[in-house]
Amino acid sequence: MGILYLLFLATCAISAIVGLLAFYFTRSSKSMPKTFSELKSEIHWQYHGVRGLIEDTILKRNNRVDLFDNEGKVAVITGGNRGIGLRVVEKLLKCDITVIMGVRNPEEAKENVERLVDIDSIKGKIYYEKLDTGSMHSVRKFANVVQSKFPKINILINNAGIMASPFKLTEDGFESQFAVNYLGHFLLTHLLLPQLKAAGTKEFNSRIVNVSSCVHLLGKINFDDIHGKEYYYPPVAYNQSKLAQVIFTRYLQKILNKNEDNNIQIYAVHPGVVDTDLFCHSSTTYIPWFKKLFFKTPEEGSRTVTYAAISPRLEGKGGSYLSNCTLVKISSLAKDLSLGEKFFKFTCSMLDIDDFFRP
Ligand SMILES: NC(=O)c1ccc[n+]([C@@H]2O[C@H](COP(=O)([O-])OP(=O)(O)OC[C@H]3O[C@@H](n4cnc5c(N)ncnc54)[C@H](OP(=O)(O)O)[C@@H]3O)[C@@H](O)[C@H]2O)c1
């Protein structure tokens, strides 16, 4: 039965790829592949998406998180007003964790939470603060507000993200996916490090969770044209931003481990292939039935993220990458510590950070 289902899934997925490619040439808002290399990137991307769907099916039983009382803990999450983040917020609140949501529109976030979250099951408190992870000025402002209210932060979830968006430079002159998905979170982690250090103990380390993606495996860091000014293909820029998060995860944990007083663990997570608005620049928008049938729901997508944030089973396993609440294969580029060091310094200089450990 299981094999038949997988075969069925694979057949549907292949038909979908063909259908999607056809759609690319007609109705989608996504950039069309214009060269052979872009077509190759596109096919690799879709293939990885299908692999992700199959992995989600195979590891479905592992995709579980036990919620338990974490009274007194404080979590910061970027995004969280919709999609996977909203369901992570719901789970954290159920654990009696105080949650600070960094969102572009706090009013709208409040409305969404009150409308979509099961308020009766909630114990924790919630705060809505303004944050645009694509603006380094906004990240600094948000960090100031958080620091002034909370001397200790137990959990930081770097969740906000955009995927395959058309080429755009932010107000800081950074490519938008790289800025929103990676640079804003790198800066936020740097600024909140003292509060994370203050909250961590030997028994329960503070946690940083970088919500990455399985397509980080396709990513490359293009040091010569990091913002895609000379060449830009949206999925390639997304892969780069998601690989950047995993390299950061791995390398930061390595440095933090050098000082045994740093009780902080950092994880990267693939939430699964999840039916959310993230796919707005994808042709899957035109086949909602496919997403409904095969993609995870946002609730299912929130489980691995929450698991990385609270599960005692992950103590001491910082620097790792998870999918379906299971430790899985990481890109070989992320394991390369000399690349990690080079990229870490490169990012610090881009953001004018003299010493990452002294905000
Ligand atoms: N869905 C999947 O299959 C999948 C797979 C792998 C990885 N992921 C990752 O999971 C994370 C969550 O994605 P999702 O699927 O939940 O997508 P989503 O439903 O589109 O939600 C994205 C979230 O990011 C926020 N956001 C976007 N740009 C922002 C900015 N500049 N500043 C602050 N917040 C911003 C959005 O807030 P607004 O409402 O203000 O736009 C929203 O809360 C992303 O990092 C994504 O890359 C998702």
Image (tube, grey):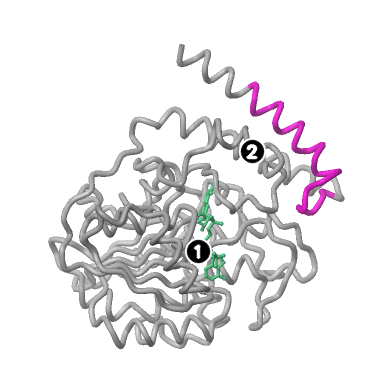
Q: Position of residue 153 (x, y in %)?
A: 27, 73
Name which residue type carries label 1. Ala
Viewer-closest of 297 and 158 = 297
Q: Is residue 346 above or below residue 145?
A: above
Q: Residues within 10 Å of mark 2 (few under 14, many from 20)?
A: few
Name the side, left or right, on which 205 lies relative to 329: left
Residue occupying the point 53% across, 75% down: 132
Which quadrant holds the C terminus? bottom left
Q: Residues within 10 Å of mark 1 (few under 14, many from 20)?
A: many
Viewer-closest of 121 and 357 = 121
In front: label 1 or label 2: 2
Queried whether the magenta region covers residue 240, the answer comes back as no
Whether the residue carrying mark 1 lies under 8 Å from ligand 1 is answered with yes
Region of the chain picked out in magenta, as a range: 11-33
**Pointer 2: what residue?**
288
In the structure shown, which secondary structural element does the residue marked by tag 2 occupy? helix
Would you identify the image quadrant in which residue 207 lies? bottom left
Q: Position of residue 224 (x, y in %)?
A: 70, 70
**Pointer 1: what residue?**
160
Queried whether the magenta region covers residue 26, the answer comes back as yes
